[in-house]
Amino acid sequence: MHNAIGGQKGSILVIFALTLVVLIGFTALGIEAGQWYLTQAELSKAVDAASLAGVANLSSPKLNSIVQDIGAQNFQSGYLGTPTSGTGAVSFTVARPSGNEVSVTGQTNASALLAGVLGINNVAVKSQGTASVNHFQIMLVLDNSGSMAGTPISDLTKAARTFIGYFENTDMQAQNQMGLVTFATAPKVVCPLAPNYYTPILNATYSMTARGATNSEDALDQAGQQLPDQSETDSADRIPQFIIFFTDGHPTAFTSTFTTNGAPSTEVCLSSGNCDSDFDTPCGLLSYSSAQDNSSNPSCTEVTSPPTGDGLPVSKTVCVAGRNKTGYANTRWGAFASYPLPGLGRESYPAYCKAQGSLFAGQSGYICRTAHQMTLDIATALKSRSVQVYAIGLGNEIDTTFLGELASGSDYLFIAPDSSKLQSIFSTIAQDIQLRLVK
């Protein structure tokens, strides 16, 4: 009996020893498995960061090196015991599944020191991540009024070319849309919203010249008409839309319908001043076709505006001239309906007969105030449609409050003290848009 018990104790010790070895091995494996999972998690973070950097630089000729640099910054060789060089050292490869996507694969060998007891010498860790950008629609709205002459217009065209360069990728152009509106006394849709936009917009920038007044409201309106209204579209299905609005001054003109002798026409009302005070220097009306003609510099005398009134023919007008009550030609301003003269009600006729007495001679500032408010009202309507508006102002006397109200938020407002800063600002906006598009 004594010998049998002694033999059992010896067996128990052997079994315990063997079990302990196995437990130590599995404990070591468990510890190292945690290390492998940590390595996997950190590699995944590096891959995600690299792919996001890739889609933010889709048009860069250094795309691959940018991606690899970002990957290496987030997971360096030797990190978490991985090899510092040679076989198993961390590496990142880049692929382009489509024009709007960047795929990054990261690989390395996790350490396997304790697990070597079980014959596990190397553990390959691999992670893949793909980032893409939403499709987009962008309208550039650029001020080429007379105050932009010289260096400013030259710097603006360079900045615009820098901006579109960020979206030059051929596949990107095929799947997205961009357009250009330039504006002075009247805007011009130089390049309608369309794919394959790079070359048309690039060529258009070389022909930009500075002349005329600053018709901001019509420019924004024309740009907004280029962007499809997505108000009724589910938010998840909307294509991101952007307007990049640039100006170097206050709004000094607006476009409206004017009716004379019963015949309506679209004309531009403008001030010959710079609208930087409470008053303007009225300039009258310009035919819209002349104001849009970029081959000339329209003057304020091209169209003589008859006195304000009901716009009816002489035989029917309620407006009269002088004590003899003789009828005369007059012009009805469509703008008065939404933006009435101070002291007069909306569409208040015959109160508007010869209203130019307070409008022009009194220098009430109606043109400047109306141009200013119309611009803000159009911007508000566009933003209600989820259009994102970037506002860029040039010069130290720019109305930053006005531009701040125009923009979609403080992050969308940029002020350049001089035109040499424009290229940097347009570059920043292009990169910001690319980041907003990432998904």
Image: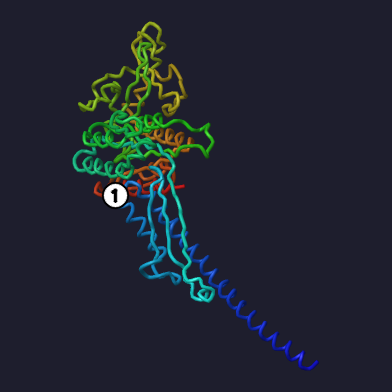
Q: Residue at x 33, y 52 (%)?
A: 63
Coloring basis for residues: rainbow
**Position of residue 199 measured from the top left corner of the image (x, y, whole percent):** 27, 35
Q: Nearer the viewer, residue 420 or 195?
A: 195
Q: In this view, does 265 lie above or below 106?
A: above
Q: Does dot 1 land on a helix, a strand or a loop? A: loop
Q: In this view, does 39 lie to the left or right of 175?
A: right
Q: To which residue does mark 1 refer?
A: 61
**Position of residue 415 measured from the top left corner of the image (x, y, whole percent):** 33, 48
**Position of residue 157 measured from the top left corner of the image (x, y, whole percent):** 24, 40
Residue 288 picture quarter? top left
Residue 349 picture quarter? top left
Q: Nearer the viewer, residue 226 or 197?
A: 197
Q: Which residue lies furthest to the top in this view?
A: 315
Q: Which of 122 and 232 is in front in this view?
A: 122
Q: Residue furthest left?
A: 150
Task: Quadrant for the N terminus, please.
Answer: bottom right
Q: Is residue 340 above or below residue 96?
A: above
Mark 1: give few (<14), some (14-19) or many (20+) Cα within 10 Å.
few
Tell me if I can see residue 368 in this picture: yes
Q: Which residue is drawn at 44% across and 38% down?
A: 387
Q: Residue at x 35, y 8 (%)?
A: 326
